[in-house]
Amino acid sequence: METIADKRLRAFPLQLSLDAIAGALLLMAALAILLAGMRAAAFNPYPALVDFYPREFNERGAYQFTRPQASLFWARPLPTGAHLTLTIQSPAPLPPRELRLSVRDNELLRLPVGPELRTVRLLLPPGDPALAGYALDLSTAEARARGDPRALGLLVTEARLAAPQPAPPLGPYALATVGIVAVALLLASLSLGWATAGLAAMLLALLFRADASRFWMYTAVLCAALLAMRIALPRPVMDRAERRRPWPPDAWATAAVVFGFTAFIGGYALANHHAFGTNGYDLGLYDQTFWLVSRMLPNYSTGAGINMVGSHANLMIFPLATLYWLVPDVRALLLLQTLAVGLAAVPLYLLGRDSGQPWLGVAVGLAYLAHPAVQNMALFDFHVDTIAATALIVALWASEARRWRLMLACCAIVVLCKENFAITVAWLGMWQLARRRWRLGTALIIGSVAWFLFATQLLVPALIGHDESLHVSRFARYGDSVPAIILFVLTNPLAVLPDLFPPGADQYLFKLLLPFALLPLLSPYTILAAPALAINLLSNFDGQRSFNFHYNSLIVAVLAVAALDAARHIAQWLGSAGHARRTAVAGWALAALLLGAAWYSQGSTLLRRDTIANYVTRDEELRYRRAYILSLIPPEAGVSAQSNLHPQLTHRQQIFIYPNPFIRADFYHPEALPFAPQIDYVVLDTRRIGPSSVSIDDQARLVDELEERGLYRRAASLGGLVLLERVPGRPAGCYGPGWAAEECLP
């Protein structure tokens, strides 16, 4: 009879092979990231033509008219010795005009331009390495031709730059490669596995691309620590590693699912942020909050004008803010979110493994991560709902595995993410009572109800300066306070029942269940989704029933566990006692059904990753121009920025979502501001102003009024992007909410 030791010995070659393959793939990914970064450092001499009219043709060839104000833009600072050749004219019947060439309001040249072609050769000053680009502004008087409604600048037939190509940064990248390989080899030498070594290498490569200075520090510390372990504690560490139980193929498959989801969706999340697809609500709010908390500054978000704990009684921001002690970068926050979502596949796998159906657990984990609601919430800025969803799945696995401390810890994480999540945890306590787990169920009910009452009646009102949560208005038809709403729902169930089926509810429920092949309908676990589902259905905010946001997080988490529970029981029923092979075949069939349903559901709703892909492709040039304008803003300056520019500027104490603080817009508790607003810069994309509680016309008009009053001057303008800089000399209150006072008039 084969012993357990024999089985482990027989599995060891497969374990070694999978570990080596995973490590090699991860190490190759790390090297690819470094190579891509070195290629991106190359200088492209061809400028983007900003505010040029489309190319036209005649018998002489191609030409383009500029607008009266236009620019040549390079996505990187110009190297020393760059020569520009510009061929221009003001063709008849347009009048002769003067062309002004300038860089950041520093005039380089003025010259008259008439109907004859004129070629200008100009040595351009080198760019500032601290900036994210280089803009050469071309300005002239406006002219119009008969029958042409356009405001015309000059005609340009050639705009060519001759510049020495900077040497590729081989030195830093070679040293980075050596450091990464050294860390990987040291980890492998301690018998911690090639997969661990490869993962560390890839994380270090990402850190090098994001923040080179921190990369050198962390790599040096890691190398020193691992080398010390290798010298001082080689055998204990290696013996412990060698005694580890080898991972079976299903565990490796789960790890591949988690890593694949994190890399795939994380790539979209980073691309979306780089293309300015993220917003102040809610990525900018959380990023500024984590930055403030990590630096022991007052937790007051100037984006929403509120203490962020008061928004949702979200105490989880404090432990999460420790991430910014290591990597204070909003991109790390986006990757943390995708990793948190991806890790949900692990407890789903463990649930399947513990029931004797590990591959069914892998399939449900994949179906969960493929769910449109899960993909979209992982790509919708940042929300702690994603962490709460994974914590809830871990809690449900811990309940089945009888790991009570872990379950209680995960339930604490869930309730500390949002006050209304405590209702789901209290319902979970009722579930435990029904299973005769009296002490556990009672503890969950009392703890979650006590926290819910404390958060909604004391903590949130104290922090936001309102009697009730800002979100109570979504249930205004039932009352104007949390106690009134709860009392109405409990005493008038017949009045509330029809509201549980608003228009489109059937489609909403079907789309929730479709990726799980409707299997949750066969499991009692589905009842645990009732509180979160009822909140979404009763809300007057349609977004809570949309897959485009994060409001379905706990619902989908419960449905995943319910789908696994139903599939497990069906597989056991289709098989029978003593027929393990038949049960396994049934499990494989159900796994295939789940994967097929998950694949089919991809077209059931709009996926954010498709929108991001289109957005990134369409606005690639705009991304570079925005990055350049934002790089002109000093790091400590107070800023009012458009919502999609806000998350790029949030590592400062004063960063408002425009038109705040000049015009109050979704700014909830200004009385709690721990300082007087002082706005040094205003940045707005005047051609792409987003809707808010302030009209688009009023937002555009505010920029002109601030300039007309002489409070701000135009520091830069590039293709509709406007950067205003404070003009000193007025009272301090004029550079904030008091800008319209008489003392601020010119």
Image (tube, grey):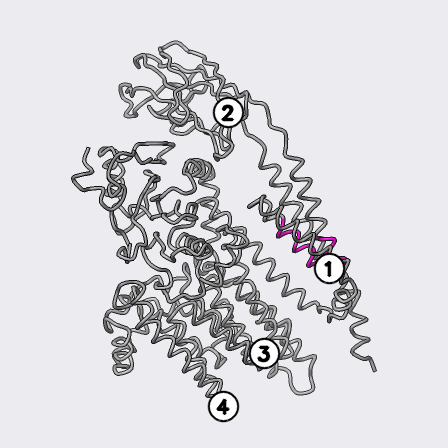
Marks 4 and 3 close (CB-CB < 8 Å): no
Q: Amino acid at mark 1?
A: Met
Give residue 568's mark: 3
What is the x, y in percent for residue 268?
Answer: 51, 51
Distance between mark 3 and mark 1 Cα atoms: 45 Å
Marks 3 and 2 close (CB-CB < 8 Å): no
- Dot 4 falls on a residue whose secondary structure is loop
Residue at left offset 26%, top offset 66%? 473
Q: Pick whichever of labels 4 and 3 is earlier in the sequence.
A: 4
What is the x, y in percent for residue 73?
Answer: 45, 29
Q: Which residue position holds label 2?
A: 126
Q: In the image, which is nearer the foreground, mark 2 or mark 1? A: 1
Residue 190 magenta: yes
Q: Which residue position holds label 4?
A: 436
Q: Is residue 659 above or below residue 149?
A: below
Foreground residue, 479 or 144?
Answer: 479
Question: For the residue carrying disc 2, how many other residues have a C-alpha within 10 Å: few (<14), some (14-19), or many (20+)?
Answer: few
Residue 569 magenta: no
Q: Residue furthest left?
A: 742
Distance between mark 4 and mark 1 Cα atoms: 48 Å
Q: In the image, which is nearer the foreground, mark 4 or mark 2? A: 2
Q: Is residue 381 above or below residue 556?
A: above
Q: Which residues are magenta?
A: 184-204
Q: Amino acid at mark 2?
A: Pro
Question: For the residue carrying disc 3, how many other residues have a C-alpha within 10 Å: few (<14), some (14-19), or many (20+)?
Answer: many
Distance between mark 4 and mark 3 Cα atoms: 23 Å
